[in-house]
Amino acid sequence: MILKVARLGHPAIRTPALAVDPAMITSPEFQRLLDDMVDTMREYNGVGLAAPQVHLSLQIAVLEVSHHPRYPDMPEVPLTYLINPQVSVMDSATMDDWEGCLSIPEMRGLVPRYKQLRVSALGRQGQQLDLVASDFHARVIQHETDHLKGEVYLDRMANLHSLSHLAEWQRFVYEPAQKRRPAAGTSDSD
């Protein structure tokens, strides 16, 4: 079932989520919720979705990047369920890149994120997960776990001057950048 996505301004977006009781995870209702979150993420072409975005104050995030139309050049991230995630930074270097959010539709902004992190969480069946994520994968995890703390990407932006409406971002930022990219088989270096 496709769930209704809360937008910025709804209290669910700014309320820190509560930890999930591990005994709940294998229940049919909880498993259905996980399926519904994945269906909702895919329906709206997201690469991640946190429970507060669907009006639930629970520490749950789902993420997946696979042949994604918005991110065709990004490495694949398998479908991942993060329940009660704990994130620790492994590389304090940051990278700026563009982000959008299903709860802040039609907008993009340049956001600094840590390059590499470790995540400890419970998985879909309540099993312990421990993974290291880098680059775009780390960005998606940070974006979703921010939602669990009642934060959004706007809170991370160093400068709001890059905040753009999606149509204008595509026209003036994304498409010009694509035209500047070297063609396949060519290189910028000598």
Image (spheres, rainbow, N blue to C red):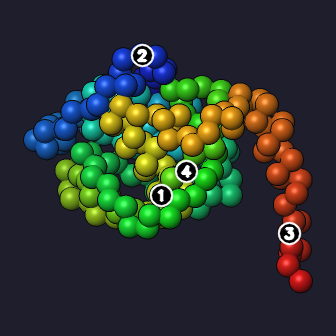
Residue at the image point whose x is 28% and y is 63% from the top: 130
Which circle marks residue 10 in the picture? 2
Helix, strand or loop status at disc 3: loop
Left of 133 or right of it: where is 157?
Answer: right
- What residue would you read off at disc 4? 112
Which residue is outermost to the top?
10
Q: CA distance from mark 3 to mark 1?
A: 29 Å
- The number of callouts visible is 4
Q: Amino acid at mark 1?
A: Tyr
Helix, strand or loop status at disc 1: strand
In primary-sequence order, the first of circles 3 and 2 is: 2
- Please name which of the two marks, 4 or 2, marks the residue nearer to the observer: 4
- What residue would you read off at disc 1? 114
Residue at the image point whose x is 55% and y is 50% from the top: 112
Q: Amino acid at mark 3?
A: Ala
Q: Amino acid at mark 2?
A: His
- What residue would you read off at disc 3? 184
In primary-sequence order, the first of circles 3 and 1 is: 1
Left of 89 or right of it: where is 78?
Answer: right
Q: Is residue 167 above or below residue 109?
A: above
- Please name which of the two marks, 3 or 2, marks the residue nearer to the observer: 2
Q: Is residue 27 above or below residue 93?
A: above
Which residue is outermost to the left?
23
In this view of the protein, can residue 53 be seen by the observer?
Answer: yes
In this view of the protein, can residue 50 be seen by the observer?
Answer: no
- Please name which of the two marks, 1 or 2, marks the residue nearer to the observer: 1
Q: CA distance from mark 4 to mark 1?
A: 7 Å
Residue at the image point whose x is 53% and y is 59% from the top: 94
